[in-house]
């Protein structure tokens, strides 16, 4: 009986700590099967100076596929097919193949693609409301992660901002627009085969 009471108390305490940021994340992920959005990505150095600005489209098909298309200033693609991640450089006619399990480890992609409990990968910190959005901080539980922290900002059940800081101090700051949930997305979008004559490099871990 003492064990049952302790278990119930633990569950109740855990529920009490779920703040508005975590609730927004749960609403965003709830019943999410596909996602399509336009994005803007700003890359900042350790002095918070902007080193680049990129635009494109992201498409996600849960649980394990996504397509990240950079449109400007250069055309590049990152395609996850469920087994491998393909880094495609159109201008150089080359592609690098990574084993998906290792390539996406401890990254925000794990959050967006996986159905596993968030706490398996991140410690979750509520940051409260700022700029009329609810903010959440995710800290990788793996001490060897290349990612130091991830910030998420929600308005209602929409993910509007994502900010990622790596161990070298570089920040990638994403803003999302024209968000569409649960569209019909063809499996072919998440497949890749290098065109004839391209250079293909394998980085399987």
Image (cartoon, helix red, strand yellow):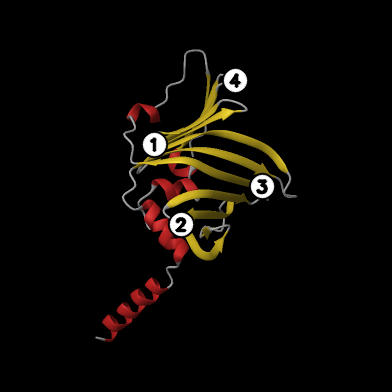
Q: Nearer the viewer, residue 73 or 47?
A: 73
Kindly identify the residue that appears in the image at 52 percent across and 25 percent down: 95
Circle 1/circle 2 CB separation < 8 Å: no
Q: Nearer the viewer, residue 149 or 163?
A: 163
Kindly identify the residue that appears in the image at 57 percent across and 34 percent down: 55
Residue 105 visible in the snapshot: no
Question: In x, y percent, where is residue 154?
Answer: 48, 54
Q: Earlier in the sequence, mark 3 or mark 1?
A: 1
Q: Residues within 10 Å of mark 2 (few under 14, many from 20)?
A: some
User: What residue did someone put label 2 on?
Assistant: 121
User: What residue did someone put label 3 on?
Assistant: 170
Q: Quick check: 142 left or right of 50?
A: left
Q: CA distance from mark 4 to mark 3?
A: 25 Å
Question: In x, y percent, where is residue 10?
Answer: 36, 77
Q: Say which quarter of the image contains residue 63.
A: top left
Question: In x, y percent, where is residue 183?
Answer: 33, 37
Kindly identify the residue that appears in the image at 52 percent across and 17 percent down: 198
User: What residue did someone put label 1 on?
Assistant: 83
Mark drawn on residue 120: none
Q: Earlier in the sequence, mark 3 or mark 2?
A: 2
């Amino acid at each position: 009986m003492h064990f049952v009471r302790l278990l119930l108390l633990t569950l109740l305490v855990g529920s009490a700590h779920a703040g508005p940021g975590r609730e927004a994340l749960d609403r965003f992920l709830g019943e999410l099967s596909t996602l399509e959005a336009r994005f803007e990505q700003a890359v900042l150095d350790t002095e918070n100076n902007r080193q680049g600005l990129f635009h494109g489209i992201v498409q996600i098909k849960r649980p394990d596929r996504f397509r990240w298309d950079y449109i400007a200033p250069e055309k590049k693609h990152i395609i996850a097919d469920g087994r491998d991640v393909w880094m495609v450089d159109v201008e150089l006619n080359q592609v690098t193949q990574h084993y998906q399990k290792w390539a996406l480890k401890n990254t925000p992609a794990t959050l967006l693609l996986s159905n596993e409990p968030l706490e398996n990968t991140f410690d979750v910190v509520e940051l409260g409301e700022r700029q009329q959005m609810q903010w959440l901080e995710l800290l990788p539980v793996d001490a060897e992660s290349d990612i130091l922290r991830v910030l998420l900002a929600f308005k209602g059940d929409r993910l509007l901002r994502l900010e990622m800081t790596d161990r070298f101090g570089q920040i990638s700051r994403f803003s999302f627009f024209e968000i569409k949930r649960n569209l019909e997305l063809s499996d072919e979008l998440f497949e890749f085969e290098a065109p004839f004559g391209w250079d293909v490099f394998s980085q399987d871990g």
